[in-house]
Image: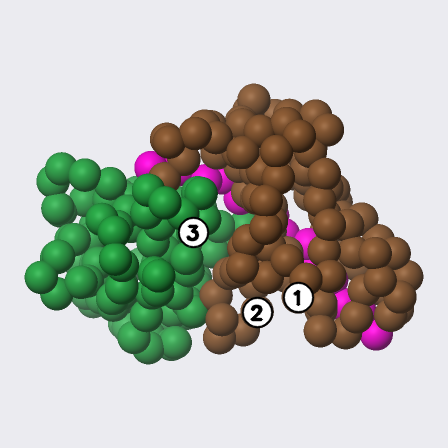
Chain colours: A brown, B green
Amino acid sequence: EAQVTQNPRYLITVTGKKLTVTCSQNMNHEYMSWYRQDPGLGLRQIYYSMNVEVTDKGDVPEGYKVSRKEKRNFPLILESPSPNQTSLYFCASSLRGGGGIRTDTQYFGPGTRLTVL
Amino acid sequence: AQSVTQLGSHVSVSEGALVLLRCNYSSSVPPYLFWYVQYPNQGLQLLLKYTTGATLVKGINGFEAEFKKSETSFHLTKPSAHMSDAAEYFCAVTGYNQGGKLIFGQGTELSVKP
């Protein structure tokens, strides 16, 4: 089944304890992205990747890191989480990383609910 | 810069009634517009999208939306609501210079009363 998977689905942690949220897609998509969803704000892009080894900042990158060493995986790293990073996180992917991305459908994972105490 | 405004954070309709969810956008470049649906505890699923061509776009589950450039709107409609339509709906916009980034509205939660 074609899908985007995220792990863990739920995570409660404490301030300053490094964590990684994994994202994997099995559709051979070039483009991958991370969003965070907060009440009343919709979804905002954190980072994106056009292809392997190509990443760039979205609108709210502060406090996050990403890497894209393999086409299928795009982990989100919080080096020193803070309470303002408590949120619902979504990974997304789409087929093309070039000019077609604006019209291609983005497929979303099921979300990771993170609480930082 | 691009932005999206969804009028009404909560909309309630009766089963069988018309569903109308409003979306207005702002864009300095030709927009590409999307509606996504989010069911409880699930990720977002694409309902429909407008890229080019016909301005009336039909999507899944009986939804449709019309791109009106003069009104900068992309409202979502469904003639007859079902209980299963209860969910949160997001309108989003992107453009050719956005690097694939979707700009989302704040979302509209749709409730369907029996």
Q: In front here: A24 or B16?
A: A24
Q: CA distance from mark 1 to mark 3?
A: 18 Å
Q: Residue at x 73, y 28 (%)?
A: A69
What chain is tagged by disc 2?
Answer: A
Labels 1 and 3 share a subunit: no
Under mark 1, the amino acid is Ser
Q: Residue at x 56, y 22 (%)?
A: A28
Labels 1 and 2 share a subunit: yes
Q: Residue at x 61, y 33 (%)?
A: A54
Q: CA distance from mark 1 to mark 2?
A: 6 Å
User: Which dot marks residue A87?
Assistant: 1
Highlighted range, magenta: A103-117
Disc 3 on helix, strand or loop? Answer: loop
Discs 1, 2 touching: Cβ within 8 Å: yes
What chain is tagged by disc 3?
Answer: B
**Viewer can see residue B11:** yes
What residue is disc 2 on?
A38
Q: Residue at x 13, y 37 (%)?
A: B53
Q: Determine if the magenta segment contains residue B12.
A: no
Under mark 2, the amino acid is Asp
User: What is the quadrant of residue A103 in the picture?
Assistant: top left
The residue sitting at the top extreme is A28
User: What is the quadrant of residue B113 in the picture?
Assistant: bottom left
Work out which quarter of the rendered image holds the N terminus of chain A and state it: top right
